[in-house]
Image (cartoon, coloured by chain):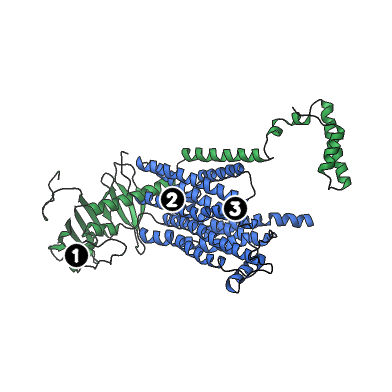
Amino acid sequence: MSRKLGRNDLDRLLREALASEPEAHVERRRDDVRTAWARARARGVALADAAGPALLIPVAPGSSLLAGAAAVMLAVGLALQLALPPRLVADSLSVRQTAVRVDAQIRRALAMTVRVERADERGRLRRYRIEWRAPGEVLVESDGPEGPGRHRLRLTPAATGPFAPAAPDEAIDPLLQPARDFLSPGRVASLLDGGWTLVTGSGREAARVFDVSKPGWRAPLRVAIDPRIDLPVRLEAKASASFEWEAGATRLPPLGEAAQPGR
Amino acid sequence: METMARTLKRIGPGLLAILGLAAGALAARRMSVPSHAGFLVLAIGEIALALVAFAPREIGAAFAQAFRRPLRDGQEWLARQFWESAARNACVLGALGAFVGLVVLFSTTEGLRDVDRALGERLLGPWLGGILLAALLAIPALRASTAAADGAFVRQPAAPPVQSLSVGLGYALFAAMLAFLLLAPGTRPGFEPSAWLLRGPAWLAVAGGALAIVLYLGDRRRGRSATLALAVAGLVAAVLGLLQALHGFALSRITSVAAGITFLLSACVATLVGLGAVALPLEDRERRLDGAAPLRLVWYGLPIVTMLLLAAAVALTLTPMAQRGG
């Protein structure tokens, strides 16, 4: 327990501790301490006992408060982290994940059939049916004001990687120009290589609709994604296109023949 | 009158920093964040941190030492400390710039548009710029000394007088820059840089952890304690975030991945901002370079480790996650 100091001891300690201070100031401090001790004696308790357990903490003054603050900050931080997931960031991450998955799936596709409708400057509709088979064989059937057409193309796959030169734009029949963005999965992927925004849809069952925009485009491209296969099923802009995809098939039908059910 | 002047001198830097913060927040509402925000962090941060730790007279002397003949005595020592400090700050600010650049990219675009090129420009650009700048700024620190009359090459000067105006200006500049970049509005909810980099739990965990370590080290006022404490607390928090993100990735749970990535990014940014705003200026003002060798591991190693963690976050964001169930 604490030991009470006598008046002589107190004077000696104060003299030693405050030796460099001016005399008047030292006297004032002595008086303050004497008064405090006298009051404590009158109540029958020592100052150390009266001040409670705070004085018994063997660390520098203020440390206990800071240590408590540190512990509270750590605990609150970790508790909030587990309790409050960042919903808005999760939503934006989910959209980005969809874009990444769709891109990967398109580039993995082995076959696709696209039906494209596009109006020319005079509002006349032209229809295309594009069949693509890896590694780049394309059959395009078109029908419109200029009459029906049938084209067989062989598109060289573009080299990939940061140092690959830009792929030369193949000379394509002017009749096929309106549908050139749909001639291969790589071109469709390039078309969708923009900023994605979720319009409607969530979960695994319903189609999710996104707007894809790029600098220089007047209006966004509206894309419906089938979440079960992570591939676009419909696309609306100046042209509208609907897709059928085949991925992971071991044997593909020859060009021009419709895919057999279950294949 | 004298008391008022003394009080103003003491609280002046804090007031200026608050004004800078408010100005930066206002600017963020009115101006769009430049696409190369990472380089902005590097350039403005260097000036701000130099002003925070060194008086303008000392900065002038350091430039004189670099471009004219080598100086003598205390000025020589000071110039060396200034250039080493500038090189170290460039490393830390380059990493901070990379984090800001990545998040500005993520907060303005969705999908994959130009993501590979943009990652190179906005993430690697500021970081490599910081390393290049650090290498350039380190050259004057290695310049040969001229011997003093008593034969000593380098003599440590006394602790500098507090230059409250330049310190305040430095803090105001640093605070304005951070507020401008981090409080910028996003294109949509969830796209604000603050949602990624100012996640409260991460900042609380880093601040609380750093405070606890400083108390344990028992030397509250020394910059070295603060540097070490921030580095340890920040790395532990960032690794916890990475673990949570990896766990979410394994379970295809997007909310866990988002929580983990934002925790990781915010913890790294809290650490780098804490180093820049608190620990490194404290170290510089102590005017001590003796025994700094172990700390150099933190100065130059920590930005590299945070960049590795950032790369892991980018990989998690851009890797397609397997879809499972609903």
A23 and A80: which is toward the camera: A23
Q: Secondary structure at mark 1?
A: helix
Q: Is residue B184 visible?
A: no
Q: As drawn, is B163 to the left or to the right of A47? A: left
Residue B326, relative to residue B106: is it above or below? above
Q: Earlier in the sequence, mark 2 or mark 3?
A: 3
* Front position among marks 3 and 1: 3
Q: Which residue is mark 3?
A: B278
Q: Nearer the viewer, residue B51 or A191?
A: B51
Give the residue pinned by disc 1: A176
Q: Quadrant of the C terminus of chain B?
A: top left
Regarding residue B77, the answer to whether it shows in the image is: yes
- Point 28% across, 65% down: residue: A164
State the residue position of label 2: B309
The amino acid on which the numbered mark 1 sits, given as a three-letter code, is Leu
What is the quadrant of the N terminus of chain B in the image?
Answer: bottom right
Residue B76 x, y percent position in the rendering: 63, 66
Q: Colour of chain B?
A: blue
The green-coloured chain is labelled: A
Q: Is residue A56 above or below residue A204?
A: above
